[in-house]
Image (tube, rainbow, N blue to C red):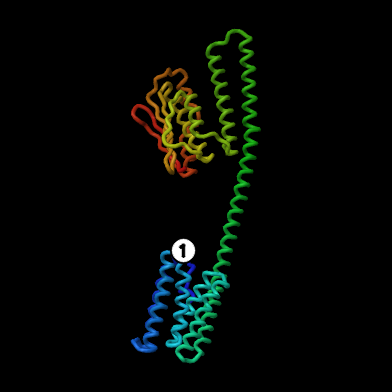
Amino acid sequence: MVIFFDPIGGPRGSWLGISANAAWLGLLVWGVTAEKHPGLDGGHLAAVMLLSAGGIGWLLWLTSRIWGYRRLLLPSWLLMAAAGGALSAFAPLGLVFVGAAALAAGMAWPAEKAALVAAVGPLAALLSAWGAGTSLVMAVWATTSALGGLTLGIARRQTQEQAAQAARVQVSEAKADAERARAELLAGRNHLARELHDILAHTLSALSLQLEGLDALIEAGPEPAPAVRNQLDGIRRLVRDGLEDARGAVRALREDLPPLEEQLAKLSGASHASLNVEGAPRRLSPDVSLALYRVAQEALTNVAKHAPGAQAEVDLAFTDDQVRLEVRNGPSRGPVNGSAKLAGSGAGYGLQGIRERVLLIGGHVEAGPAGDGWRVEAEVPA
């Protein structure tokens, strides 16, 4: 019976348990009416009235479980215990009401409070037996039924509390493991950031200084050829951009990147592209922010390589659960000086690299012709 009488199986109870309780009530009514045939005289009428009261208490108990009316619990248990105890003087099956009320109270409340509910049934049985002039032995059986139900209820409550405590301990341990894993990950990322800064950023900084020295030598000597000056300016620009990228990678590893829209505004300005931001900007994770930045960087680099002088547009759209980045460009309108060499630079793995990067964070990238130009679009969950 313990599996059926579960008044604390969730705020609205288990429908299986509620159905079983309703079935138990039906069997109980059938058993009492079979034992004490209904009638309108003497003990028959008293049995009918007490059975009705106990049934009402039982239904109130079920109602409190279905709709979560906890205020009905105490009245329903008291009505069940009192009616069942009094009914036992006419039909012994009324003791089921006493045991059920004590069991339910023991499962839902501390032992001290539940004992008050359990005491009502034996007291009602004693008064009913005395008033009806029947044997007082039913009061003893009512006490046994109440104590049995109360003991089972308290045991069930303790079992559930122990299970809940074990679950809380497991959750706490899982959180602690996750925090340790995150701390180890951050330590590894910080270590990598330091190495990247010490090796790559320092190397680029030294190279930048060497270029400045070379520029000073060229300035002190004869007038250099325009091509030499252009090449030197291009190298200086590449070193400056590489140094900024290295710093951005270090910030990403340390989870210290500025908002994506700020990064794209700076990148678009340097590439002479327009930027349009839709939706409400929000802080993105470093992985998502860096991946989308790399998509825009690769797309704008390809515009400079393959369509010099083309007008480029960068669209960044924030939705509830996604971020979309689109880079479009029109046909080439600029001079082609040196564009063939620039177009042939690199290993040709740029789009493949950004596809793999975006795929790792659960997104996807599409790239292809768009009218007279080209379009690259990336969508990631965020």
Q: Is residue 36 above or below residue 231?
A: below
Q: Is residue 273 above or below residue 166?
A: above
Q: Nearer the viewer, residue 102 or 249?
A: 102
Relative vertical location of residue 8 with respect to residue 200 in this rendering, above or below = below
Q: Residues within 10 Å of mark 1 (few under 14, many from 20)?
A: some
| Amino acid type at image mark 1 | Pro
Q: Which residue is the extreme one toward the front?
A: 131
Name the residue beneath numbered marker 1. 11
Residue 293 image position (x, y, % from top left)? 49, 34
> In the displayed structure, would residue 267 be above or below residue 27?
above
Q: Nearer the viewer, residue 39 or 36?
A: 39
Residue at 47% across / 86% down in the picture?
128
Instruction: Give the residue drawn at x 62%, y 37%.
Output: 193
Find residue 203 and report its horizontal and vertical position in percent.
Answer: 64, 28
Residue 111: which quarter of the image?
Answer: bottom right
Extreme-top residue of the structure: 222
Along the line of sight, which residue is nearer the eye, 290 or 29? Answer: 29
Q: How many marks?
A: 1
Point out residue 286 in the picture as x, y percentages from the top left corner. Answer: 54, 39
Regarding mark 1 in the picture, which secondary structure is present there? loop
Q: Residue at the location (41% across, 64% down)? A: 67
